Image (spheres, grey):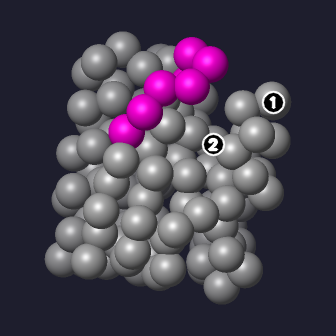
Amino acid sequence: MLRLEKSTENQSEILSLFGEVDASNSVILDEAIQDLVEGGAQSIIVDGTQLDYISSAGLGVFMSYLEDFNDKGITMKICGLSPKVYEVFKILGLDQLIPIYQDRASAAAK
């Protein structure tokens, strides 16, 4: 099960993820990011503090935006991942493509 919360903090849009992102609900994450982009977001911080699991389908959502964000000058950062979730990002090399921070304060400061 996945639950999302959106908020704004210091000119960054915060997307907090709760639970699990898998093939059955990754479209919810995709729609949430799309909504932020359509709303004019230039800085997106994905807070994974309460994210228990992410599948390759969930990671694919992030990957699908990389080129578009680069072209539009939109920054996306991820923070607060547990060691096991971070490992999934690392195995697929996403830690080299998306800045990942220990916590929200670190992500917002960069």
Do we see residue 74 in this rendering? no
As helix, strand or loop, the secondary structure at mark 1 comes to loop
Task: Tell me, for residue 110, which label it has, or none.
Answer: 1
The earlier-in-sequence mark between 2 and 1 is 2
Query: Residue drawn at (28%, 43%), measured in percent from left and top?
Result: 32
Label 1: how many residues lie within 10 Å, few (<14), some (14-19) or many (20+)?
few
- Residue 104 x/y as whole percent: 69, 45
Query: Residue drawn at (38%, 77%), measured in percent from left and top?
Result: 20
* Alpha carbon distance from label 2 to label 1: 9 Å
Please state, as top left, top right, bottom left or bottom right, where the C terminus lies in the image: top right
Q: Is residue 10 magenta?
A: yes
Q: Overall secondary structure of the magenta stretch?
A: strand
Q: Is residue 108 above or below residue 77?
A: above
Label 2: how many residues lie within 10 Å, few (<14), some (14-19) or many (20+)?
some
Task: Tell me, for residue 77, which label it has, or none.
Answer: 2
As helix, strand or loop, the secondary structure at mark 2 comes to strand
Is 31 left or right of 20, judged from the image as shown?
left
Task: Tell me, for residue 87, which label it has, or none.
Answer: none
Location of residue 96 (image quadrant):
bottom right
Query: Residue drawn at (80%, 29%), measured in percent from left and top?
Result: 109
Q: Is residue 19 above or below residue 72?
A: below
Please state, as top left, top right, bottom left or bottom right, where the N terminus lies in the image: bottom left
Q: Nearer the viewer, residue 100 or 65?
A: 100
The amino acid pointed to by label 1 is Lys
The amino acid pointed to by label 2 is Lys
- Residue 97 x/y as whole percent: 67, 50
Q: Give, as a single range, the part of the protein colored magenta.
A: 6-12
Q: Is residue 105 above or below residue 91?
A: above
Q: Is residue 34 magenta?
A: no
Do we see residue 86 in this rendering? yes
Pointers 2 and 1 in contact (C-beta within 8 Å)? yes
